[in-house]
Image: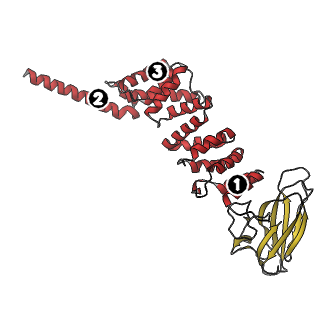
Amino acid sequence: MLKTGIIWISGLAIALVSGLTAMGAIAKNKAPELAIALPPTNGYAAENIASKSVQIAIAENAGQFPDQIDPKVSELARQAFIAEPVTPEAVAVLALSGADQSKRELMGKALSLTRRQPLITAWMIADSGAQKDIPALLNHYDSMLRTNSSAASAIIPVMAEALADESFIAPYTSLLEKQPPWASQFWGAVVRTPVSVVNAALLREALYKPDENDDIYRDAGLIRTLAFNQHFETAEALYHLLAGQKETSSFVKNGSFDAEPEFYPIDWQLFSTGEYGAAVTGGKLQLSAIQNSGGLFARQLVKLPAKIVKLDIKPRDPIPDNARIIVSLRCAQAMDNAPRTIRIPLEREITDLQINNANSGCSFYWMEISGRASENGGGFDIALDSISLR
């Protein structure tokens, strides 16, 4: 009878402990204060409270890790670690509570337990930045982006701006060669970050492979941002790498209209409205306008040497009388005393028309094709077979 009673009491105690432990496990995230009030000590709940206390302190400290941790929080982290030795955030809080020389070592141990805790990764990022260890910094960003889907909106813009520093080019090359899942977002942010686009072009060149899958890149956007921010040389160099077109004697790219433009405005930038527009199709540049309409049809950035060049334009058919077409060369560079814009009426085929750029001081020009249909008649459709400057 006594033996039976002892067994019954022992069973009841085990059931009670098991029940309390289960309640603690359920409550550790939703009600951690309740969980730690229930014996035995729930290490995960204690870790949760300690970690959240530090996160609140960081928020109150304008995003900086505090120099001192509340002793009560440190004690809670210690209890969490004793109860559950694999509580990474508890180890992180203990690291923050320790002397400066031990923080890095303890944080490293916390990181070895998990790469999914933002508190740990954020400290490693801050420490890598303080140590100017760029590869480590980027690797920690990579870890956070891979493990925390909500981190991209905060981290990606910071990474894009960091590329303004040329010392980031080589580390970014090593990291992006692995094609991380966030690469497409990164390139999307880069093209919206003008201070970084020159180094972004150098990075893109370093990553280029002839047989690559270029879906993750934003090449057309990068070239546009370069050109529209006056980085003409860099935009041209990147275009020639990516387009893979053979060098010709003409300074006009795709002047025979063999391919649809992909990288404007280094190649043709086409404009269209409901009343007029341009298209590259069937090996020609098609210009169309309805009655009494018109404007800018197409343009391209061209680099001209400081010498006399010759312009050739070959229409497929005669230019109709009711069409006024103008080909212009306008200096694209921001400069004092820019040369006057050259305007050439296109009334018939042009052959060997000489343009003197010897003393203009301008190298990059907008070649623009504009036009208008007269008030009389039914509009026009004009096809140009080729344009060259040589």
Q: Which mark is residue 337?
A: none
- Say which quadrant the N terminus sits in: top left
Element at label 2:
helix
Q: Secondary structure at mark 3?
A: helix
Task: Look at label 1 and name its amino acid.
Answer: Leu
Q: Hey, which quadrant is residue 325 in on the image?
A: bottom right
Q: Position of residue 150 (x, y in %)?
A: 52, 43
- Residue 20, numbered circle: 2
Q: Is 185 situated left or right of 32 in this image?
A: right
Q: Which residue is mark 3?
A: 74
Number of the front mark, 2 or 3: 3
Q: Residue at x 41, y 29 (%)?
A: 87
For image coordinates 59% across by 28% down, the residue present is 64
Q: Are marks 2 and 3 in contact (CB under 8 Å)?
A: no
Q: Is there CB contact under 8 Å for labels 2 and 1?
A: no
- The residue sitting at 89% across, 70% down in the picture is 353
Question: How far, Cα to Cα, is label 3 from label 1?
Answer: 54 Å
Using the numbered discs, state the Cα–Cα distance from disc 2 to disc 1 in whole angstroms: 65 Å
Is 82 left or right of 304, judged from the image as shown? left
| Residue 136 is at least partly visible in this image | yes
Viewer-nearest of discs 2 and 1: 1
Residue 310 sits in quarter? bottom right
Q: Above or below — where is 312 with respect to 71? A: below
Mark 2 crowdedness (10 Å alpha carbons): few <14, some 14-19, many ≥20: some
Q: Quadrant of the C terminus?
A: bottom right
Which class describes the residues within 10 Å of circle 3: few (<14), some (14-19), or many (20+)? many
The mark that comes first in sequence, 2 or 3, is 2
Q: Is residue 68 visible?
A: no
Q: Is residue 198 left or right of residue 90?
A: right
Mark 3 or mark 1: whose residue is earlier in sequence: 3
Identify residue for label 1: 238
Of tags 3 and 1, the one toward the viewer is 1
